[in-house]
Image: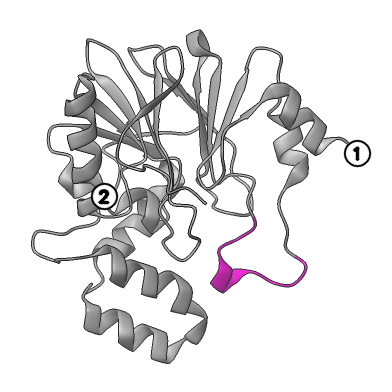
């Protein structure tokens, strides 16, 4: 299998560019999207670490894409927000339900030692916390940042990007990001099952939610841990 280039953005459609996620599930490194705009781009999710964020920044410069002015969280889980402290000068946007859990995360004494202690206390955290340990090369200057601008139902940014709350079992603050002029809907993890340490044998993907997000006005659907799919492919996959 050919290696996937995760540090060079590829244009999906219109002004939407993607930094593909790592296909290795143990890496827990999601896709990060950039909606280019000369007034300031919108970056969707922060990267799963400051190091990941810095790779994305280098990729943006190499591609000649405008610097981000807004950073949208699709939800509060670590792999979507831990890179935020490496994005100076951006306004962080997220659903109001993500504020409290992110403040709680910000208060925790993050370190490799703390990660090991937590896994010993609750082995079900192993997958997530080992991935965090691998992602973090240094804790210097690291902090978890709640959104500076929140919304309840939906929010339209000056660049025409629409952020819409959908909730769901994966995270109560899950939101999708619509780029109408490019026909792209960025889904984050909204239709996925709950995180592994909270999942029960009965939990599965929320296919009803996924079907409800399909519309003739959108051609591309981008989940954070899967390859983008076109509308016809998504409809065929969700038929039944």
Residue 214, image x and y in percent? 71, 25
Mark whose residue sits in front, 2 or 1: 2
The numbered disc on residue 21 is none
Residue drawn at x 49%, y 53% as measured from the top left: 23
Residue 136 sits in which quadrant? bottom left
Residue 104, image x and y in percent? 32, 64
Residue drawn at x 29%, y 54% as measured from the top left: 82
Cα separation between marks 2 and 1: 38 Å
The residue that label 1 is drawn on is 240
Question: Quick check: is 146 in the magenta stretch?
Answer: no
| Magenta stretch prevailing secondary structure | loop
The residue that label 2 is drawn on is 52
- Quadrant where the image shows the C terminus: top right
Q: Secondary structure at mark 2?
A: helix
**In this picture, residue 143 sits left or right of residue 5:** left
Q: Secondary structure at mark 1?
A: loop
Q: Is residue 202 above or below residue 144?
A: below
Q: Is residue 201 above or below residue 104?
A: below
Residue 35 sits in which quadrant? top left
Residue range corresponding to the magenta coloring: 193-202
Q: Farthest residue in the front direction?
A: 1
Q: Farthest residue in the right direction?
A: 240
Q: Nearer the viewer, residue 194 or 102?
A: 194
Q: Residues within 10 Å of mark 1 (few under 14, many from 20)?
A: few
Residue drawn at x 32%, y 25% as measured from the top left: 42
Residue drawn at x 23%, y 20% as measured from the top left: 65
Residue 81, image x and y in percent? 33, 50
């Amino acid at each position: 299998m050919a290696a996937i280039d995760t540090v060079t953005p590829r244009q999906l459609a219109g002004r939407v560019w993607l930094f593909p996620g790592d296909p290795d599930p143990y890496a827990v490194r999601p896709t990060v999207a950039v909606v280019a705009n000369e007034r300031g781009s919108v970056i969707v999710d922060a990267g799963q670490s400051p190091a990941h964020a810095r790779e994305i920044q280098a990729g943006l410069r190499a591609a000649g894409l405008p610097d981000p002015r807004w950073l949208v969280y699709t939800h509060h889980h670590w792999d979507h927000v831990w890179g935020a402290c490496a994005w100076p000068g951006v306004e962080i946007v997220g659903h109001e339900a993500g504020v409290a859990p992110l403040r709680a995360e910000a208060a925790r004494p993050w370190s490799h030692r703390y990660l090991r202690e937590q896994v010993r206390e609750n082995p079900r955290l192993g997958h997530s916390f080992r991935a965090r340990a691998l992602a973090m090369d240094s804790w210097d200057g690291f902090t978890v940042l709640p959104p500076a601008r929140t919304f309840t139902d939906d929010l339209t940014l000056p660049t025409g990007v629409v952020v819409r709350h959908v909730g769901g079992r994966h995270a109560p603050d899950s939101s999708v990001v619509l780029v109408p002029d490019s026909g792209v809907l960025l889904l984050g993890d909204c239709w996925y099952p709950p995180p592994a340490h909270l999942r029960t044998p009965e939990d599965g993907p929320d296919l009803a939610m996924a079907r409800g997000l399909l519309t003739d006005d959108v051609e591309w659907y981008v989940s954070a841990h899967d390859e983008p799919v076109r509308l016809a492919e998504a409809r065929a996959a969700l038929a039944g």
